[in-house]
Amino acid sequence: MDFDLSWLSGELGACVEKHLITGGTIKDCYGSQVRANFYLSVLKPSIINYVLIDISVMTKRKHEVVKLIVKSKVLNVCFFIHLFRVFADKENAHLTTPQILNKYGYPIEIHHVTTSDGYILTLHRILPAKNTIRKPVLVLHGLFVESSSFVSTGVKNGLGFLLADEGYDVWLGNVRGTPSSRNHTTLHPNRDPKFWDFSWHEMGTIDLPAMVDYVLNVTYQASLHYVGYSQGTTIFFVMMATHPTYNAKIKVHMAMAPVAYLGHMKSVPFGTTWNNILNLWFKVFKINEVPPNNLFFVLRRVCSFSFKLCNLVSMSIFGYKTNQEDSNTLTYFLTHFVVPVSRKQGHHYMQIIKSGYFRRYDFGRRKNEEMYGSSNPPSYNLSLVTTKCHLFYSRDDLLVSEVDAARVCKELGGACASSNLVNGTIKHPDWLIGNRIGELVYSKLLNIMADY
């Protein structure tokens, strides 16, 4: 080797030199004591190796790592940085939903629901206090997150905690494909592409009805409250448009950043041209599961070098730089927006952006004829929703515009009980992790729910 490895300190340096330079495996290097994890992943079917490198030297000697990889003849390398490891003491940064609830002393139950098509979904329940009867509320997450997004910010700002403190029997749902619901009776997510053959249509027609029925059966209640965020609202609208009998099972829908139309979104990377390119790329390489480590590769990499530049890139995508964020919030955001989604799930959203219609998945003219009996997919009829819906949206949300939210309210008709333009600067992620989201949104949401 014609380059210096002395910067790889102690145990780690010896391990890398022994296993990588000599051509062997480096999986044994996992145990090296370092302050941060940097992964060099070989994207080959039969081999995935990792190198753990101390961040204090990594930021200064990145070029040595590149030379190390090249000289070792390791091809197709995806180099991505888990920046959040730098903030290892950041509250709840690496904890699962059960771990977070246990940390704060909230009793939890883990429930599993098997859908009619074999997906095994996980529900996290914050247990009711003894000898009390509480009204059940089902809370459903958005795209790229799962149930942890409602408790990760802690007891003061976590919606799951606030609902529990108000006396609700809280059920945090996890749709198919998320880490908590990455299971099936016959299909394996890593081996069977068919596992990922779903969009949010199946979540609305199958997953959510299964969750609702399960919660009502366990709690012996006839109806429940529902809180949805972003994709969680989409799934609700799909369920009601396809299974209108479920209107009787939902007392009220509290919709944060409601998504049915996206024609006026302002986030450039989510525009139709970029999304068409992505979808074509995923199809060509037969990528069915879309890991956010790939989607957010650039953002993570940028954040490793410059927090200011990181904010600039993030703002162009999510409009994320707000008065709500503190020094660690962006890192925290990247930590928790790491849930895989299906290619079809993301592409379904691309289709409604392009078409301007809230409708079923577009398979193309020929298959549409077979599936739907028409060349175009049918639209979801929001007039079938009779459950009272309270919409919350912000002018500063680049993904859910005021115009699109107003269109949802108009099509809901009498079911749109209130349309709340939230005061304050709230971008799309802020509905979950904004420092003032409790006072700006959650307090009003809880007051409205108390009337049902």
Image (cartoon, rainbow, N blue to C red):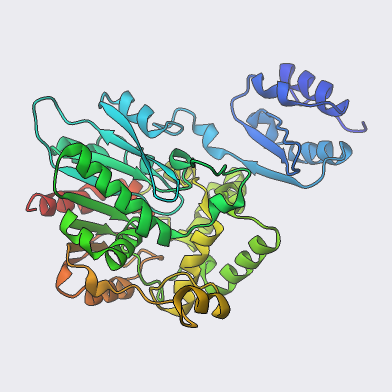
Nearer to us in this view, 3 or 102: 102
Residue 251 visible, this orientation: no
Total marks in image: 0
Most extreme residue toward the right is 2
| Position above or below: 435 against 280 | above
Q: Is residue 51 above or below residue 321?
A: above
Residue at 67% from the left image edge and 57% from the top image edge: 286
Q: Is residue 7 toward the left or the right of residue 242 in the image?
A: right
Which residue sits at x=63%, y=19%?
33
* Residue that extends furthest to the top in the rendered view of this protein: 11
Identify the residue at image location x=53%, y=61%: 344
Q: Residue furthest left?
A: 451
Q: Is residue 318 left or right of residue 323?
A: right
Q: Is residue 28 above or below residue 309?
A: above
Asked if residue 188 lies left or right of residue 219, the reply is right
Q: Quadrant of residue 113?
A: top left
Quadrant where the N terminus is found in the figure:
top right
The foreground one among 116 and 303 is 116
Residue pictured at 69% horizontal, 30% vertical: 57
Q: Is residue 211 visible?
A: yes
Q: Name the residue nearer the viewer: 131 or 217.
A: 217
The x, y position of residue 192, in whole percent, is: 61, 47
Q: Position of residue 24 (x, y in %)?
A: 84, 26
- Judging depth in this view, the residue of 73 and 437 nearest the camera is 73
Q: Position of residue 34 (x, y in %)?
A: 63, 23
Residue 285 picture quarter: bottom right
Give the image location of residue 408, x and y in percent: 28, 72
